[in-house]
Amino acid sequence: MILAGVDHTGPSLYQIYPHGSSNCMQYTSMGSGSLAAMSFLEAGWKPDMNEEEAKKLVRDAIAAGILNDLGSGGTVNMCVIKKGALDYLVPYEVLCSKGTRLNTYQFKPGTTPLLSTQVIPLIVDKEEVRRIDQESMDTSS
């Protein structure tokens, strides 16, 4: 979990781990796409970024997480937190939309449908085939 906000001391960003410890960070990422996202954050973060620079960096980091992890969805969502204001940017950008199902598929439990069949004969020259299990493996190196 990432917790962010603004109080009388200024803006804060905390990374809270599942086992309960926390860190106050300048930038952070968590979740299944976090390694790809963190690479963008580490390369692009700088102190005193303006809002548009920060949005672009966050967008690029989230996009990297999404595009490098199948479990991260396909939409970049953002929340901009300022003193006295909260702006949800949902969706900020749709990177890849969910496909649409072309047909309805209903099968009896325990069955797998066969959609098509193609038989390709395999021609093997018996002289070129050798049995691997008859040779011993060289393990001397």
Image (tube, grey):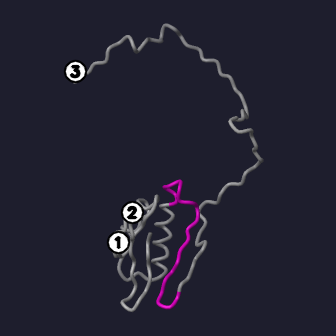
Task: Find residue 140 and name its label.
Answer: 3
* Local secondary structure at mark 2: helix
Q: Quadrant of residue 47?
A: bottom left
How far across and how far down the image is residue 19, in percent? Answer: 37, 64
Could you tell me which residue is drawn at 41 percent across and 89 percent down?
A: 7
Residue type at tag 1: Ser
Q: Quadrant of residue 98?
A: bottom right
- 28 relative position to 120: left or right: left
Q: Earlier in the sequence, mark 1 or mark 3?
A: 1
Q: Residues within 10 Å of mark 1 (few under 14, many from 20)?
A: some
Q: Is residue 45 above or below residue 7?
A: above
Q: CA distance from mark 3 to mark 2?
A: 43 Å
Which residue is identified by label 1? 22
Which residue is identified by label 2? 39
How far across and how far down the image is residue 76, in percent? Answer: 55, 68
User: Where, quadrant-wise, is the N terminus in this rendering?
Assistant: bottom left
Q: Is residue 18 above or below residue 27?
A: above
CB contact under 8 Å: marks 3 and 2: no
Residue type at tag 2: Ser
Q: Earlier in the sequence, mark 2 or mark 1?
A: 1
Q: Is residue 96 above or below residue 108?
A: below
Q: Residues within 10 Å of mark 2 (few under 14, many from 20)?
A: some
Could you tell me which residue is drawn at 38 percent across and 66 percent down?
A: 17
User: Where, quadrant-wise, is the C terminus in this rendering?
Assistant: top left
Residue type at tag 3: Ser
How far across and how far down the image is residue 97, in percent? Answer: 64, 60
Q: Earlier in the sequence, mark 3 or mark 2?
A: 2
How far across and how far down the image is residue 122, in percent? Answer: 60, 17
Q: Nearer the viewer, mark 2 or mark 1?
A: 1
Any magenta on residue 25? no
Span colored in magenta? 66-85
